[in-house]
Image (cartoon, grey):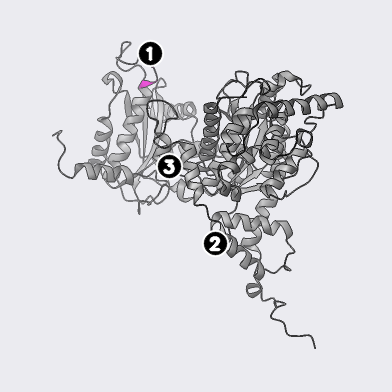
Amino acid sequence: MNALQPGDREALHRVLHARRDVRTGFVDTPVDDERLQRVLAGAHTAPSVGFSQPWDFLVLRSPALRDELAALAQEQRRAFAESLPAARARKFAGLRVEAIREAPLGVVVTCDPTRGGRHVLGRHTQPRMAAHSVAGAVQNLWLAARAEGLGVGWVSFFDEREMAALLGRRAGMPQHLEVVAYLCVGHVASFADEPELATAGWARRRPLAWAVHDDTWGNHHVDPLDETLAALADLDTTPGEEAAREHLTRMTVPPGALGGVAEIGVRLAGLAGSCPPPLPEPAVVAVFAGDHGVHARGVTPWPQEVTAQMVANFLAGGAAVNAFAATVGAEVQVVDVGVAARLAPAPGLLPRKVRRGTADMTAGPAMTRDEARAAVHAGIETARDLVVAGNRLLVTGDMGIANTTASAALVAAFTGASAEQVTGRGTGIDDATHARKTAVVAEALALHRPDPADPLGVLAAVGGLEHAGLAGFLLGAAALRTPVVLDGVVSGAAALVAAALAPTASHAWLAGHRSVEPAHTLALDHLGLAPALDLGLRVGEGTGALLAVPVVTAAARALADVATFDAAGVTDKNEAGDPP
């Protein structure tokens, strides 16, 4: 009975890979009781903590009750939609997230935390193991249903207690139970080849290699930086760029009239490998945050505590980056890669701390080489996660008191400029502080003599943790052929590091604006990037880059939407005859 038979392994893996969360395509063919019982029996064989079997299955056939449940889910859908940035909300509006009315059956899977009494083996220190066991039963049900040719859709758009209260009133469900899942079950017209959310462009599947860690966290079979650099070695943008330039000659605008907007479109098409490129939305700004040991040298009047305070401001939605992100419909994520203070968990905060701020770069290296590499890894993985989540345009941001000092040192190291040429006034320092800041940059450069041929060495010597994170972010996005809009001098300094590691990565980058910091112009010139905007900004945070997002989107839309001469029936000047 329990022995596997020849062919079982292959059949099991086929079922695993063919399982789908079904939201569309249910048909009105009844589900016979014998088939349903086999599916529920499969669910009932799931493992459970202390063999407590804390699940129950409430099978709902009543259309009236399912109508009431669908109304609850619709209300939560509206609430979720209102919380989304504009581009995400537009995408979400076209998604089907439940089929409560359409599926012939609803199965409510509950967890009874009292089952088995007080002394359930394995639940004493982990009380949530009961609900985790029920989740295993849900997976068994899902797979058994697929083997029986039935579709299953897990509906999570419910307030759990609100749903439990309704089921208590209408179905007599005891109120001490926890609702783990509402499942739509029924025959379907067909099963999709890919998950519906992947087909709709909402998200992608992560490669298995990204999720496997050997012995220690972050120890992947292939090092993320090595894997990223290998992918970038073959990045060829020529076919897409040539297609875009040819298309521009046929568009109903005078040659060259779109100026820099056309060049942005060409870069987008080159990265995509086709023309027109996909619309670069939704967008997300990743604000990398870290503190700097060089702060102790008096290079800024702002106390170091402001870094953590501003991070809290970002998370509360009260900063300039939040206002600008809301204006262009972008999401804000804060990446703690090196803030000195402890930060409490919060929505929108990615805890990726490598260490609590850097050391003073005038007394020794700002960080170790391993720490620099770890921060680069954090940036690569942040880019991967945001792209897999469905974002098609990444935006760089930063926060860190004294980070323009480290930025100046990095720009000097990679461009050969002097401390006097790269050192700006940051947050608006006075003459005395500016002179001290310039001297500190010169002192650090003299101490380390950074070699631009060793980008990680330069980064470790005079960079910041947010620079390292941003460098990885830029590389990770480029390896996934996802465009990135660069912000100001901190992003520019990080881009110099990334470009030194992988020159082809710069094909994915667009300069959002030109900061008033002198080092930023030097960095952009060295990278060969022309800023989309020049508004005299020096806020940082990602603000200037966010303002350029509509320009980037417009460049892609122009290639997609502006008619050609042939399509519009407009005479091309090259086809018109000589004037009479």
User: Is residue 126 found inside the magenta-colored segment of the image?
Assistant: yes
Reply above or below: 8 against 568. Answer: above
Between residue 241 and residue 524, name the one nearer to us.
Answer: 524
Give the distance between the C-alpha atoms of the residues marked 3 and 1, in whole angstroms.
Answer: 37 Å
Q: Amino acid at mark 1?
A: Thr
Instruction: Tell me which numbered mark, 3 or 1, is placed earlier along the sequence.
Output: 3
Q: Quadrant of the C terminus?
A: bottom right
Give the distance between the C-alpha atoms of the residues marked 2 and 3, in whole angstroms.
Answer: 46 Å
Q: Amino acid at mark 3?
A: Ile
User: Is residue 495 found inside the magenta-colored segment of the image?
Assistant: no
Mark 1 element type: loop
Reply above or below: 355 against 398. Answer: above
What residue would you read off at disc 3? Answer: 100
- Region of the chain picked out in magenta, as a range: 125-129
Mark 2 element type: helix
- Identified at 49% across, 50% down, the residue is 200
Let me know if residue 394 appears in the view: yes
| Residue 525 on image: x %, y % | 71, 47
Q: Residues within 10 Å of mark 3 (few under 14, many from 20)?
A: many
Majority SS type along the magenta span: loop
Give the distance between the C-alpha atoms of the residues marked 1 and 2, in whole angstroms.
Answer: 58 Å
What residue would you read off at disc 1? Answer: 125
Q: Residues within 10 Å of mark 1 (few under 14, many from 20)?
A: few
Reply above or below: 208 against 313. Answer: below
Tag nearer the camera, 3 or 1:
1
Tell me the number on the disc at residue 239.
2
Tag nearer the camera, 1 or 2:
2
| Residue 260 on image: x %, y % | 72, 56
Instruction: Tell me which numbered mark, 2 or 3, is placed earlier along the sequence.
Output: 3
Let me know if residue 490 appears in the view: no
- Identified at 76% across, 40% down, the residue is 515
Q: In which quarter of the view is residue 452 placed?
A: top right
